[in-house]
Image: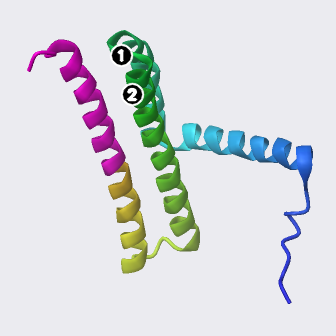
């Protein structure tokens, strides 16, 4: 016998509308409550025109914007992990620390990927013969 979730009863277009609303709620909550997410959104907004100027073709532009989106996505997931751990307990716990540290490490790796992609585009733009 499987337990069914009473919140999973919507189907079709109604489910899509509610899923979109929940996603928007999550973005608003992250923007209001997470300074790192706010900083990355602002940085991303500032870098959009820079990406359009730096990219030499559509592939580079998509890679640059994709790297930025990956940072935002991973930051959202990290914030969700932190909120879940904090919901359980503020008490010091090695597993809680591990979960939070791993989320933070994921953000770091996303930022490294971002730097590699943007660095490669900068290199190709300004040092094409090298």
Task: Residue at 44%, 26% (x, y): give it.
Answer: 44
User: Which quarter of the picture shows residue 17?
Assistant: top right
Q: Earlier in the sequence, mark 2 or mark 1?
A: 1
Q: Tell me if residue 114 is in the magenta stretch.
A: yes
Vertical placement of 36 versus 99: above or below? above
Residue 110, position in %: x, y? 36, 45
Task: Residue at 69%, 44% (x, y): give it.
Answer: 23
Q: Is residue 24 visible?
A: yes
Magenta stretch, residue numbers = 108-130
Task: Residue at 42%, 21% (x, y): give it.
Answer: 61
Viewport quadrant of the N terminus: bottom right
Viewport quadrant of the C terminus: top left
Report the residue marked by disc 1.
Answer: 55
Q: Tell me if residue 126 is in the magenta stretch.
A: yes
Residue farthest to the top, as pictured: 53
In terms of secondary structure, where does tag 2 sit?
A: helix
Q: Is residue 43 visible?
A: no
Vertical placement of 26 versus 45: above or below? below
Q: CA distance from mark 2 to mark 1?
A: 8 Å
Q: Is residue 97 left or right of residue 83?
A: left
Q: Are marks 2 and 1 in contact (CB under 8 Å)?
A: yes
Report the residue marked by disc 2.
Answer: 64
Q: Residues within 10 Å of mark 1 (few under 14, many from 20)?
A: some
Q: Residues within 10 Å of mark 2 (few under 14, many from 20)?
A: many
User: Which quarter of the picture shows residue 96?
Assistant: bottom left
Vertical placement of 84 versus 66: above or below? below
Residue 67, position in %: x, y? 40, 35
């Amino acid at each position: 016998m499987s337990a069914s979730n009473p919140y999973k009863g919507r189907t079709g277009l109604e489910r899509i509308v509610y899923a979109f609303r929940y996603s928007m709620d999550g973005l608003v909550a992250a923007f209001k409550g997470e300074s790192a997410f706010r900083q990355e959104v602002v940085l991303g907004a500032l870098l959009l025109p820079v990406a359009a100027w730096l990219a030499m073709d559509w592939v580079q532009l998509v890679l640059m914007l994709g790297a930025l989106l990956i940072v935002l996505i991973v930051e959202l997931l990290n914030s969700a992990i932190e909120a879940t751990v904090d919901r359980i307990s503020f008490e010091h716990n090695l597993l809680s620390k591990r979960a939070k540290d791993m989320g933070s490490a994921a953000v770091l790796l996303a930022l490294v990927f971002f730097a590699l992609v943007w660095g490669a585009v900068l290199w190709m733009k300004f040092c094409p013969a090298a």
